[in-house]
Image (cartoon, rainbow, N blue to C red):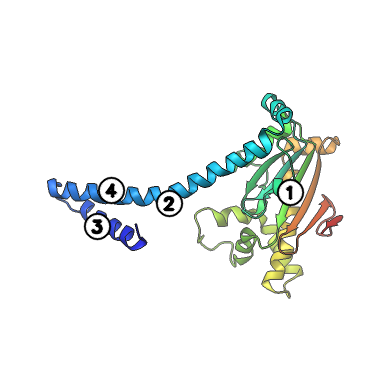
Amino acid sequence: MSRESYDDALERLGELLSCKSNLGKSEAAKMKKLFDELEGHKSNKSSDAVERIQSGFIHFKTRKYLKKPSLYNALAKSQSPKFLVFACSDSRVSPSHILNFQPGEAFEIRNIANMVPVFDKTQHSGTGAAMEYPITELNVENILVIGHSRCGGIEALMSIEDDAAPNKSVFIENWVKIGTPAKNRIKQEFGDLSFEEQCTHCEKEAVNVTLGNLLSYPFVRERVEKGKLALRGAHYDFVNGTFELWELDVKTTPAFAFS
């Protein structure tokens, strides 16, 4: 079914549904035909997605799952990851792919611009719950926050000209404003740079804001103070294929750089 015929079907369906009178037999027949056409279009699109999902799982099972029975038998009983990784939801920055984490090695939390809000039981409880479990129950030893190049969330943050202005999005602007301290610092220190360069600096400084916010969580601070938990920041540049890693107190100067 072509895009035009699909749109036409939607339009005709809308006309029928907007009719105030009760549907007669002819109208009901027309509606059934339209639904059949729409269902056919949906099936064609979904078949490609289903095929991709199926082939992906077959590849995983034959190339990995069946070749490492001891690993997956152990994981069936328990997990003991050493890393808790915060990363962006961006499809180009999968931590397991970038850092070659194996199943059971890293507990991952992904969201827009890899941010963590300041501790608050009444807001962003989903983030708090996702953190609390791997830290207090699984006893991860390392937290790694990964920022990345050309981050749309950071661009959105840096594009907000007036924090008091009405939001242009339903969720995104309120969320990325968590990184406002990073934006303010970059605007102040690098205001003479281009917008793109400012965003690059902010991608790293927002990681530092998240590292600082993590310490506002009692169960994080307690473990850091006792030396049971280490916090590190990182920046993955997928344009140049580089990875920078720094400790909590190093700010934007990387302790290690990999290329």
Asked whether disc 3 touches disc 1, contact meaning CB atoms under 8 Å apart, the reply is no
Q: Which mark is residue 45?
A: 2
Number of numbered labels in the structure image: 4
- Measured in 3D between alpha carbons, the distance from the residue under mark 2 to the one under mark 1, in whole angstroms, is 36 Å
Q: Amino acid at mark 4?
A: Phe
Q: Residue furthest top?
A: 77
Q: Which mark is residue 145?
A: 1
Left or right of 16? Residue 236 is right
Asked where in the image residue 63 lies, by quadrant, the reply is top right
Asked where in the image residue 7 lies, by quadrant, the reply is bottom left
Residue occupying image coordinates x 74% and y 56% = 236
Q: Which mark is residue 12?
A: 3
- Measured in 3D between alpha carbons, the distance from the residue under mark 2 to the one under mark 3, in whole angstroms, is 21 Å
Decide which of tag 1 and tag 4 comes sooner along the chain. Answer: 4
Residue 150: x and y in percent read 66, 63
Q: Which mark is residue 256?
A: none
Q: Of circles 2 and 1, which is in front?
A: 2
Decide which of tag 3 and tag 1 comes sooner along the chain. Answer: 3
- Measured in 3D between alpha carbons, the distance from the residue under mark 3 to the one under mark 4, in whole angstroms, is 11 Å
Residue 82: x and y in percent read 78, 36
- Measured in 3D between alpha carbons, the distance from the residue under mark 3 to the one under mark 1, in whole angstroms, is 50 Å
In the picture, the quarter occupied by the N terminus is bottom left
Give neighbour class at mark 1: few <14, some 14-19, many 20+ (Cα, 10 Å).
Answer: many
Q: 138 or 206, which lies in front? A: 138
Left or right of 139? Residue 56 is left
